[in-house]
Amino acid sequence: MSGHEIRCPNCNTINRVPRYRASRIPWCANCHFKLPEPWTTRVLRLVYWYRREIMLAAAVITVPTIVFGPTLFAEHQLTSVSPPSDLVKAPDTCAGHSQPDTGLYQLYIDGSELVAPLAVHANSDGNYFVLLISLASGMPVESFFIRAGQSIEYRAPLGSFVLKYAKGGRWCGADQLFGPETVTSDFRKQTLVFGETRGHEVWLIPQASGNLRTREIPREQFWHL
């Protein structure tokens, strides 16, 4: 069978990767550690993740129009002409994205790895997109959409993880999250450790006796450590 034989840098297990993909991260079948891959694949993955931002940036680049206008003496003047302001409209990047139901949004690993209990309760001040990122690989393992004031009960893989979340109103897809109004936050790099008999219940609601301190983070830091 064709493919690449990759040795895991964590447990030394040899894994067979059929082919590298920008849309899929290779994981060790034994210890679930992120496997080495070409730098070109990593670059293509960043382009894949932020393809909407790239397309939007390309769409808003305008080139001034130069026209020639005759004068009384048949001379020519260069004039920059801009379109009327009422004709310039920013594209609606949220069009076509319906609001998901509360629950698992996407799983980025094998579902058989999910063994530890996880519960997340959202505040009623907006909709939430929650991301669980592996401390070992620095990449997401699962994500959830939680509507305002609702909760999810699911499972997480074993190990140490960082939880991040985005908050907003209108859902614009995983690339745009909640559009320009999106607020992205984490728990100041505090980790959640999951074991076979150890789970976590997280309240995204301010608590007088809470033990998780949140902070806003830049949008570009949301999808990785």
Image (tube, grey):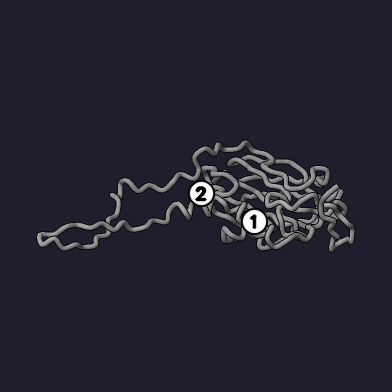
Q: Within the image, what quadrant is residue 74 found in?
A: bottom left
Q: Which residue appears at 88% of the width and 53% of the height?
A: 30
Left or right placement of residue 109 versus residue 10 in this view: left
Taking the image as shown, residue 164 lies to the left or right of residue 52, namely right
Residue 44 is marked as 1
- Quadrant of the drawing holding the C terminus: bottom right
User: Which of marks 1 and 2 precedes in the sequence?
Assistant: 1
Q: Nearer the viewer, residue 195 or 56?
A: 56
Residue at the outermost left position: 72
Q: Secondary structure at mark 2?
A: helix
Q: Amino acid at mark 1?
A: Leu
10 Å crowding of disc 2: few (<14), some (14-19), many (20+): some
Residue at point 72%, 44% (across, down): 107
Q: Position of residue 113 (x, y in %)?
A: 82, 46
Residue drawn at point x = 69 percent, y = 54 percent: 163
Front residue of this view, candidates 38 and 113? 38
**Residue to which mark 2 is pinned:** 179
- Tell me the distance, in whole angstroms, between the alpha carbons under discs 2 and 1: 23 Å
| Displayed quadrant of residue 65 | bottom left
